[in-house]
Image (tube, grey):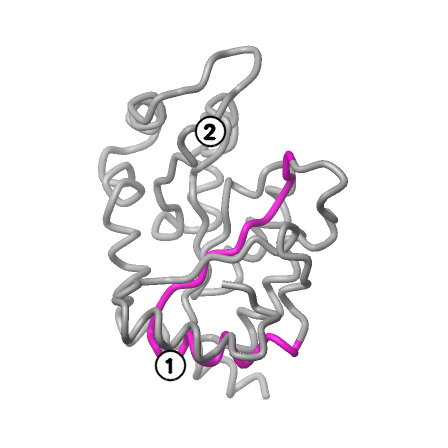
Amino acid sequence: MDPKRDDAIEVLKKAIEGLGFKGLKFHPPLQDFYPNDERYFGIYKEGQRLGIPIVFHVGSTPFGNLCKLSQANPLLIDDVAVAFPELRIMLTHLGTLWQNEAFMVVEKNPNVFIDTAAYLYEINEIITENLISRIGEDKIIFGTDYPMPSPPHPVHNMKAFVEKIKHLSIPSEIREKIFFKNFERMVNPPKKELQKAISLKEIIR
């Protein structure tokens, strides 16, 4: 969905309530917008009302001078997460070279998750027990971004991504969370968690 359309909110509402779509993804660099621009806050408010997750591409992109990396900075999403604490948000690709910034946003915001759709060699380098204990074992969601090349290797199949997560040096119960339980939690979060986030925001105010 083009967030710059005058009827963007109506398009989103029709997609979810009329066509049965389950969520929304933005690629700010390719769509040429800054996700923390308040002109788009009406879309997030509607997404929050509809109870859907919104996925934002963050980190590097292979599209060269078609894109501006400044629009893919994960720290921009922190503004969105703070303004809409009931909106479930997922960041992509383990942050893709902006992982520290992405993990900061995930760590501090109860409503923000991150997916594992990264280059295969990155996954075991980045997803460690220390990282998981830092950002929370309920915040990482399996993804493949398939098909995706990983030069100089050929395009990897989906099984390669599954095997990579299966062989991480982490407890089996955390693997289960990454593979499916955390996705279920993002789509249908326990109400008490979102209420806790809102209450904390009110206290700070």
Instruction: State which quadrant residue 179 falls in.
Output: top left
Counting residues from the N terminus, which is met first, the one under dot 1 or under dot 2?
Answer: 1
Disc ID at residue 125:
none
- Assess whether residue 63 is covered by the magenta stretch: no
Judge the density around disc 1: few (<14), some (14-19), many (≥20) Cα neighbours within 10 Å: few
Residue in the image at 50% along x and 27% along y: 119
Residue in the image at 39% along x and 46% along y: 140
Instruction: State which quadrant residue 128 falls in.
Output: top left
Q: Which residues are magenta?
A: 38-62
Instruction: State which quadrant residue 41 falls in.
Output: bottom right
User: Against 121, is 197 above or below?
Assistant: below
Q: How many marks?
A: 2
Name the residue that disc number 1 marks: 49
Residue type, label 1? Arg
Residue 61 picture location, percent across and down: 63, 39
Residue nearest the viewer, comparing 147 with 10: 10
Mark nearest the camera among 1 and 2 is: 1
Image position of 92 (left or right of 13):
right
